[in-house]
Amino acid sequence: MATEPRPARRVAAALLAFALALRAPGAGRARADETDAHQQADEPSVSSFDLRLGWFEQDGHGFQSQTQPSGKPGSERATIVQPMALFRIRQGKHVQHTLVIPVDIVTAASPDALDAISSASQRNEAAGIDMTTAIAAGVNDFVIRWGVHVEEPLRAGNWGAAWTRHLAEDNATVTLSGNASFDYFDNISQEGYTDEQRSRVAANANLGASQILSPTTLVDGSYGITYQVGVLEQTWNAVPRGPMRVPLGEKFPHQRTRHALFGRVAQMVPLTHTTLKLAYRYYVDDFGLSAHTVELRAYQYLSRWLVVRGSWRFHTQTGVDFYTENAVNLMTGPLTPRTADSDLGPFDADELGVKLMLLPRRAPWPWLRPHSFALSYERYTRDNGLSMDVLALEWGQEL
């Protein structure tokens, strides 16, 4: 006979489910009835699915865009529509597969100049498949992940695996994970021509841990290292050399090592049914870029089945050592590192967001209980002129 979980473990389960798993409607949810026939059967069966429609509107200017005369930042105007489907497939009691199918439809000002010959970049479609398999084996959890992505100039694949060990009666965990990705893409020049193909490879390793400090407090953190090798630059990006001069192409070193340190604390306030999460991330790489990111999230129950989440994120970074807005200032040569990409320059950024979520199986009306809904809006701005508005609508159903 199974023993009743200890109170600390019940609190841990509730805290993990609410403070960490509320990333999207239904994320991390489990079926309430553990004897459900779909879970007991060995054959795979879809236990739930989610559909998401995201709308991204971006505006701003950057020197990597060629929509303006030489020496002036061009438009980075972009509209991205992203429908996405997520399926959870249960195979027995201890194995669950998660299949994500995203599709991107992009219209953008900045890449239009790339395809002066074909004009193909005025609208670009992209699609992919991402499969994650989670296996629960006693005090150990195993995750295997793979995916592919295809769009007009790019083909990519990724693989990964993770192991989690549950310690101290499930009050603490330790996680090891590794990932690898391979990109194979067209070598598009600034003039819009393609010269064969290029590739790059990235390998990533992470160590993470979590610990329950009290019945209402949880902390977790991680360290990650990533190594990249190959053609790391965007082959069509422009680096200006002043007015009336033909810009240079972007050039990166052949390899890059990146480090990221992350920490987070989640605090429940039972009196008000509120959860607060404060996170910090430090990033540094051997291109000379370092960054600090602070994020605050607050979850508030409006009712037993309705939750609102507010978020604020601040990011500040230095630029890479070879960032420039006028390559005349560099000792330029064929192999001299250089970039004018605004993403790699120094800037400060703010992001504000709000999300309203309907939790499955908690609605007062039986017909609504298998469903989850979410509506979110985020506003992202940074002081080098880029801004983005993101609107997302999500719907899910348990089967």
Image: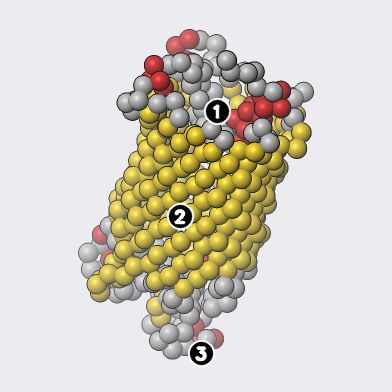
Q: Report how far apart the C-alphas of labels 1 and 2 lie in the structure.
A: 31 Å
Q: Is mark 3 on a helix, strand or loop?
A: loop
Q: Which residue lies furthest to the left in this view?
A: 118
- In the picture as drawn, the residue positioned furthest to the front comes out as 1
Residue 361 x, y percent position in the rendering = 51, 17
Q: Residue at x 39, y 52 (%)?
A: 159
For this view, does 194 lie left or right of residue 283? left
User: Which residue lies under the disc numbered 2?
Assistant: 179
State the SS at label 2: strand
Q: Quick one: 191 or 312, which is closer to the camera?
A: 312
Q: Residue 29 carries which label?
A: none
Residue tagged 1: 357
Q: Which circle's residue, 3 or 2, is located before the other in the chain? A: 2
What count of labels does the image hold?
3
Can you say whether 43 is above or below 127 in the image? above
45 or 106: nearer the viewer = 45
Q: In this view, does 273 lie to the left or right of 201?
A: right
In this rendering, which labeled residue sits more in front, label 3 or label 2?
A: 2
Toward which corner of the image does residue 206 lie, by quadrant?
Answer: bottom right
Return the x and y of residue 107 as percentages of the image width and height: 35, 53
Instruction: Pick whichever, 28 or 9, lies toward us.
Output: 9
Cα separation between marks 3 and 2: 37 Å
Residue beneath disc 3 = 331
